Image: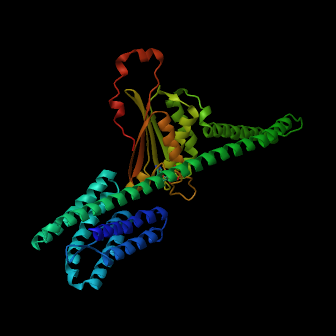
Amino acid sequence: MYDFTADLIFHFLIMIMIPFIHKISSYRGDYWKTSAPLFSVLFLALFLTMTFPVEIAGGQFFDLKFIPVFVAYFYIKPLAGFLTIFALISFKGFFSPGDIWIALVNYTIISVLFFYASKFYKKCTFRQKLSIAVVFYLPITITRYVIFLQKDINEDAVYLLMFSAVSIMTLSIIIYLIEMNLVQENMMEKLRNAEKINAISQLAASVAHEIRNPMTTVRGFLQMLKNEKNLTADQKTFIKVSLEELDRTNHIISDFLSLARPETSVASKVSLSGLLLEVADLMRPYGLMTKVEIRTSIFEGIFIMGNPNEIKQLFINLMKNSIEAMPDGGILEVSAFKRNTTADIQIKDEGVGMSKEKLHMLGQPYYSTKTKGTGLGLMISFDIINRLKGKYLIESTQNKGTSFTISLPLYYSPEEIRQPSFQNMSEGQRMNES
Ligand code: ADP
Ligand code: MG
């Protein structure tokens, strides 16, 4: 009994190395390079558990080789699992060549099952993952029992039971610890991103502010020059245009500053119809560069509540992306209409579209497929939609095009709110955030 317990503890300790090494190896970048430490510890654990197996009843040896195989399949990738099984069978062939066929058959079956399971494992919840581990471990335990019964050594079955219980516990603890590592890593990454964005917007705001001061000086001198008596007509035009351009730049910087400082934003009643037409006009020259035609079908009299600068920024970002998605030209359709309690806006292009994987990545900071892209446009846009308490739906087909549908709550004057008729929200909620 003493030996048996000591053996179990020894095997538990071998296996518990796995989550610790997992913690210190991170998974970004080159998969094979970053998972090399984990891979090595899996091999080491496999080697140790097979070299010093637990002895139950004379001649019956058991080990925990199932665990490294499980971790390699589900926490590195199926190919790693495959290699681990290959190593396992090689060890087996080396130590006890007689048993190699049983191992070969067993682990071929496990290999196929794990391969299919690894396709959905990542999306499972923690409990589902534990269930998968138990479900896979159960047949192994049952087979062992059957062998025990056949060999008529059932008085030692209690040891087997204990061994199985410890195995499944060890596997559960390892899964738990690895999952905790992943959650922590994920949160750290999010924090880092948030921190980067914060730093960038603060820097940008200060730069914008610094640009304004010299501009004021230049504007002042131009203003003085304009009043000179002996100027030609051409010179007068040049100065006039320069002043206009300076004002325009100033305006853009003001807009930008108000975006960088969301706390100063004030919500007001905004004519969505007017604003969309304005943005479409603003984007037209940009579209013309790549022969993109912007078509609008916008209903009049749509009002929403929000910060006009932010709403403008939202549609500029989306239309800009659509235009950039059509380098060989095409049609960009912007439509807007009222539906019950919401304003529905659709921005539809005939551009390159996106694959499912790409769609999934949208809105993550710095995710961009463009050489000059910042990968910030959509993140900011989604944030604006959230703050407007809106919803969005993105549909995209590769090489066909993309459509962004946004539904924002309509503005109601206080009198209208007293009429109960509009409070049917069900239709407005038909869209889910994707
Ligand atoms: P950026 O435009 O700087 O790349 P965004 O956050 O605006 O950053 O967009 C992120 C990525 O999403 C783009 O690089 C592009 O790959 C993809 N994307 C966004 N909108 C569209 C669209 N309308 N059609 C195709 N791909 C798009
Ligand atoms: Mg963009």
Who's the residue at 67% across and 43% down the image?
205
Q: Position of residue 254 (x, y in %)?
A: 67, 37
Instruction: Work out whether 350 lies above or below 10.
Output: above
Q: Position of residue 415 (x, y in %)?
A: 45, 14
User: The C terminus appears in which quarter of the rendering?
Assistant: top left
Who's the residue at 49% across and 33% down the image?
388
Q: Position of residue 190 (x, y in %)?
A: 51, 50
Total numbered circles = 0
Left or right for 351, reference 204 = left
Determine which quarter of the picture holds residue 63.
bottom left
Q: Position of residue 268 (x, y in %)?
A: 55, 26
Determine which quarter of the picture holds residue 119.
bottom left
Who's the residue at 30% across and 74% down the image?
85
User: The N terminus appears in which quarter of the rendering?
Assistant: bottom left
Who's the residue at 47% across and 16% down the image?
414
Instruction: Work out whether 288 lies above or below 172.
Output: above
Left or right for 12, reference 297 = left
Of residues 286 and 340, the one drawn nearer to the viewer in this rendering: 340
Q: Is residue 344 in view from this perspective?
A: yes
Q: Is residue 238 in view from this perspective?
A: no
Q: Residue furthest front?
A: 2
